[in-house]
Amino acid sequence: GLRTFQSARREAKTMLEGGAPTPAVGAGRAFREGVLVEALNPKTAAFFLAFIPQFLDLGAGHVALQFMVLGFVSVTLNTLADVVVAFAAGRIRDGAAGRSGMIRRLREASGGAMIALGIGLAVAKRPAL
């Protein structure tokens, strides 16, 4: 949170001095990192192992094939939703690109929110067992 807050100020200062903003990550690299993160995410495996078996018909045979088809349908629907969100975020980013003050304030606010969440976690009491 502190780094996000500080980098928002640093980039605003750089842009005021006529410097170029930090270059964006390339699309290919972003895609590869996204696939890697999702493939190694244990929550994804837990979801598939907990949710999909409810829809398998053991009497129909080919349980592994049913599992793969349902998994493919889930991945396809999730990917379509992600594509819609990515295009919407791109349009929002393009619209906000000329408003550096607003971007700086949003980044400062997100950094502040992360700091507040961290403080909340640090002071939260652990429930007794």
Image: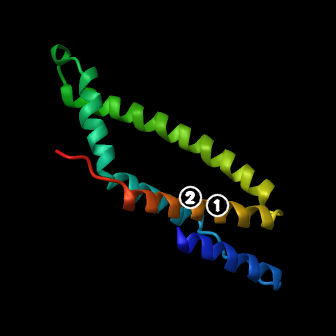
Q: In this view, does 88 lie above or below 119?
A: above
Residue at the limit of the structure toward the top, as seen here: 59
- The amino acid type found where label 2 is placed reads Ala
Relative depth, front residue between 47 and 14: 14
Check the image and tell me how it is coloured. Answer: rainbow
| Mark 1 lies on residue | 109
Q: Do the residues labelled 2 and 1 touch (CB within 8 Å)?
A: yes
The x, y position of residue 100, in whole percent, is 79, 67
Mark 1 Cα-neighbour bin, 10 Å: few <14, some 14–19, many ≥20: some
**Alpha-carbon span between mark 2 and mark 1:** 6 Å
Q: Is residue 64 above or below residue 12?
A: above
Instruction: Tell me the residue at 19%/24% (across/down).
Output: 62
Quadrant housing residue 84? top right
| Mark 2 lies on residue | 113
The x, y position of residue 113, in whole percent, is 56, 58
- Element type where label 2 sits in the image: helix
Relative depth, front residue between 126 and 98: 126
Relative depth, front residue between 94 and 8: 8
On residue 42, which mark appears? none
